[in-house]
Image (cartoon, rainbow, N blue to C red):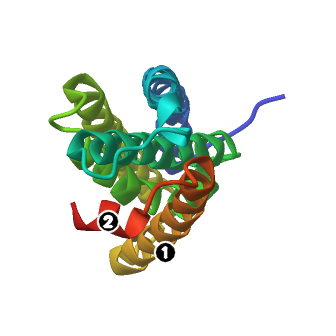
Amino acid sequence: MLVKYNEADIENISHSVTLVPRLEYSSNLLSEIIDIFSEKLHDIRKSNCDFVLFFDETDKNHYNAIELERNFAFSLEVLTTIKKRITSISGVRSIPEVLPSLIPMIRTISAQFFSIVPICSQRLSELSVHLGSIVLDSAALTKARFDFSQSNHESSIFLDEVKLMVDSKISKQYPNVDFSKLCNT
């Protein structure tokens, strides 16, 4: 049986085939970053475990250590959710629906860790570039249009929700800490 394709169909097929390995690479890169963040968070929690009982409110280093733990916990939660969303992509048409709101989240985390974990910040920047190119290529294939202000708004709402959740967990983890002072340091 002879199947006829027009040139546009062949071009779309070849472009969508190139998206799969790039998406897989992005997912693998994100997994590596998540592993590093998990390890760092584990180490920080281990070093902060004494703060549950013995927290010195006069020591700014104690507050800084808990703030660092909170930042890592927040970022890890966001990155894990991003990983789930990336793995939920089921076809080229779902890419413009899923990825645009993830890129601002990745950039936010990258900026937070620029001086703390430069290699992760650099890899997150690379990840945002890869995902941005995938979004643009998928839009060319699907003729999707984007409202980047809407994507930024969705990202902002999600980041605020995760921040509240992480703040709640940290507050329960360190019941002897006055977190209103932590916000003022």
The amino acid type, in three-letter code, at marker 1 is Ile
Judge by depth and name the residue closer to the eye, 111 or 185: 185
Question: Can residue 59 be spotted in the picture?
Answer: yes
User: Is 119 situated above or below 106?
Assistant: above
For residue 69, side relative to residue 181 (left or right): right
Residue most extreme to the left:
115
The image quadrant of residue 36 is top left
Disc 2 or disc 1, which is closer to the eye?
Answer: 2
Residue at x-position 54% and y-position 67%: 164
**Mark 2: secondary structure:** helix
The amino acid type, in three-letter code, at marker 2 is Lys
Residue at x-position 39% and y-position 56%: 105
Judge by depth and name the residue closer to the eye, 135 or 172: 172
Label 2 environment density (alpha carbons within 10 Å; few <14, some 14–19, many ≥20): few
Q: Which mark is residue 181?
A: 2
For residue 25, side relative to residue 173 (left or right): left
**Mark 1: secondary structure:** helix
Q: How many marks?
A: 2
Residue most extreme to the right:
1
Which one is earlier in the sequence, the residue at label 2 or at label 1?
A: 1
Residue at x-position 42% and y-position 63%: 179
Question: Can residue 10 be spotted in the picture?
Answer: no
Q: Quadrant of the N terminus?
A: top right
Residue 34, given in percent of the width and then of the height, sits at 50, 29
Residue at x-position 54% and y-position 52%: 170
Residue on which the image places disc 1: 157
User: Is 167 situated above or below 40?
Assistant: below
